[in-house]
Image: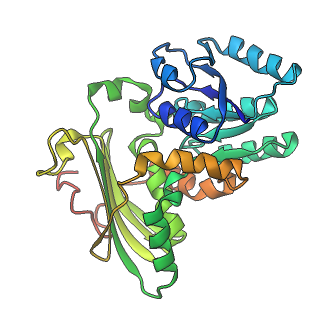
Amino acid sequence: MTNFALIGAAGFVAPRHMKAMRAVGGDLKAAIDPNDSVGIMDSHFPEAHFFTEFERFDRYIDKQHRSGERIDYVSICSPNYLHDAHVRFALRSDCDAICEKPLVLNPWNLDGLAEIEASTGRRINTILQLRLHPAIIALKQKVDASDRRHSVNLSYVTSRGRWYHQSWKGDDKKSGGVGTNIGVHFFDMLSFVFGAVTDSALHLRNERQMAGFIECEKADIRWFLSVDRNDLLPGLAEGQSTYRAVTVDGEDVEFSAGFTDLHTASYEAILAGKGFGLEAVRPSIEMVSAMRTADIEPGRGERHPMVPDAR
C-alpha cells in the first residue's frame, strides 16, 4: 500500500487529494493544517493522525521512517508561497512530493528544487490536471495534425466574496495574484496544446481581474480571468458561480465535465511513474511570473471581448 502525508488539509483543494489517495488504494497516515476545520477527513481517512503544529508533524514523519513504516508521498495543498518550502521538506524527509499548482511562484525557485531533487534522489510531481482531460488531449491531437494557425479565446470567471481579498489569496506576494492563483493551470494547458509562447501583452491587471494576449507557436490567444461576480455572464443557471469557456476558431471546447475528477487521474499517473516534473511546469511559471511586473499595453495584440473599456 502507498502511504501518504498531507500538508494543508483544511484547504479548498485538499478533499480532491484525499479522494484521489483513496481511489488509488493509498492510505493517508498524517495530515497537518494550522486550522482544525478538517472534518472532511472523516469521509476519507478517519484514522489519519492530524497535527496543527509543523514540528509535531515533522517528528511523526521522522518516526515513521525510523520505524520502517515510511511515508511514500507528501501531498502539498498549502498556500502558494509555502509550496517550495514544503516540497523541500518532503524531499529532505526522503519522500516524493505531489504539489498543487502553482508549484512555485517564480521560475528561479525551480532551479533550487532541481538541485535538491538531484541530491536526495527523490522526485517532485506537480498537478497539471488539464493535460489529462480527454477533451484537451483530443484538442492537442487535432492541433498537432493541423498546419493552420488558430484563434483562441479563454474566459474564466470564478466569483469570490470579500473573504478572498482578506485571505492569503488576495495578497499577491503570497498567492501570485489572479493570474497565478486561478490561471496557472490554464496557461499550462495553452502552451501544452499550442506550443511555446513567442510573444505576449498584458491588457488588464488589478486585484480582481487580469487579461491579455498570448502568441504561441500555433495560436493567437486572447484571455480573461476574474474573481469578480459582476463578470459572470447573464443567462447562467441560478446559483452558478463559475464560468469557464475556451473557443478555438469559433468552436467551443467543452471540458467542464469531469473537471473535478482529474486529481485521481493525476495520482494514477504519478504512481505509474508518469507524473509531471519540474521542466513540465516551467513554461507556465515563467508566464505568470512575468505577468506580475509586465507593463499594461492595451493597444498591443487582440483584446478579449470581456475586457472593459475603462482600464
Residue 191 drawn at (x, y percent): 51, 65
Question: Which of 143/26 is in front?
Answer: 26
Image point (31%, 24%), residue name: 163
Foreground residue, 32 or 194?
A: 32
In this view of the protein, can residue 297 be seen by the observer?
no
Task: State the residue lying farthest toward the bottom.
Answer: 147
- Residue 267 vs 309, above or below: the answer is above
Q: Is residue 46 visible?
A: yes
Q: Quick one: quadrant of the N terminus?
A: top right
Residue 39: x and y in percent read 46, 17
Viewer-closest of 254 and 309:
254
The way the protein has been coloured in the rendering is: rainbow
Query: Relative to 140, is 61 above or below?
Result: above
- Could you tell me residue 266's position as x and y percent? 58, 49
- Pick out the residue farthest to the left: 235
241 on left or right of 124: left
**Quadrant hosting residue 123:** top right
Residue 159's quadrant in the figure? top left
Could you say where residue 107 lies in the image, as x and y percent from the top left?
62, 49
Residue found at x 73% / y 29%: 89
